[in-house]
Amino acid sequence: MSRRGYQACSRKSAWIAGTLFMVVLAGCEPFWKTPESRALDFAEALVTMPPDMQKLHDIAYLAPDRNPEDLLDGLSARVALDFLRAKQTHGVALKFALGETRHIDVLRRAVSVRVSWLQPGTPANSEVRMQIQIEKDAQGRWCITRVTGDN
């Protein structure tokens, strides 16, 4: 096979392999959508989109008759939520990031979510942390079960 034929064959193989990879990757959303990212999405939606109850129910896998704010456990979680919502209302840009994850057992995890913002006039970010408890239900879905302040 000539060098030119080899290059054409390798380009075609690369194109086919790339297309196959993209098709497989597109069908694997649960592969990269981790339970921890569900906790992060819930915390962000709880702070930034409180009126969107449907989105909160969908992320947490809550029954339609339950209020997502019922998952808040303790005064520190409620104060943190109110404080972050107030920051959001005043136009402060919040950054949500995953902290550490503690595997309680095979079916339960505690995920720390860090919410930071740049305080005007200071060189450092300020931060509030929340801990999101997640559990695997009978259908194998990761459900949000509790939100506490992360001390």
Image (cartoon, rainbow, N blue to C red):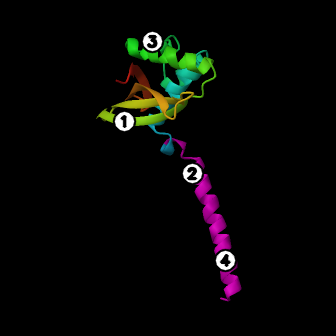
> Would you place residue 67 above or below residue 136 in this image?
above
Circle 1 crowding by C-alpha within 10 Å: few under 14, some 14–19, many from 20: some
The question of residue 96 being in magenta is answered with no
Give me the disc on residue 70: 3
Q: Which residue is mark 1?
A: 101
Give me the disc on residue 9: 4
Callouts 2 and 1 close, C-beta under 8 Å = no
Q: Residue at x 62, y 61 (%)?
A: 18
Circle 3 crowding by C-alpha within 10 Å: few under 14, some 14–19, many from 20: few
> Would you place residue 123 above or below residue 29 in this image?
above
Question: CA–CA distance between discs 3 and 1?
Answer: 22 Å
Question: CA–CA distance between discs 3 and 2?
Answer: 36 Å
Q: Which residue is mark 2?
A: 25
Q: Secondary structure at mark 1?
A: strand
Callouts 3 and 2 close, C-beta under 8 Å = no
- Which residues lie in the magenta part? 1-30
The answer, for residue 63, to whether it is visible in the render is: no
Q: Earlier in the sequence, mark 3 or mark 1?
A: 3
Q: Select label 2 or label 1 by which is in front.
A: 1
Secondary structure, magenta segment, majority class: helix
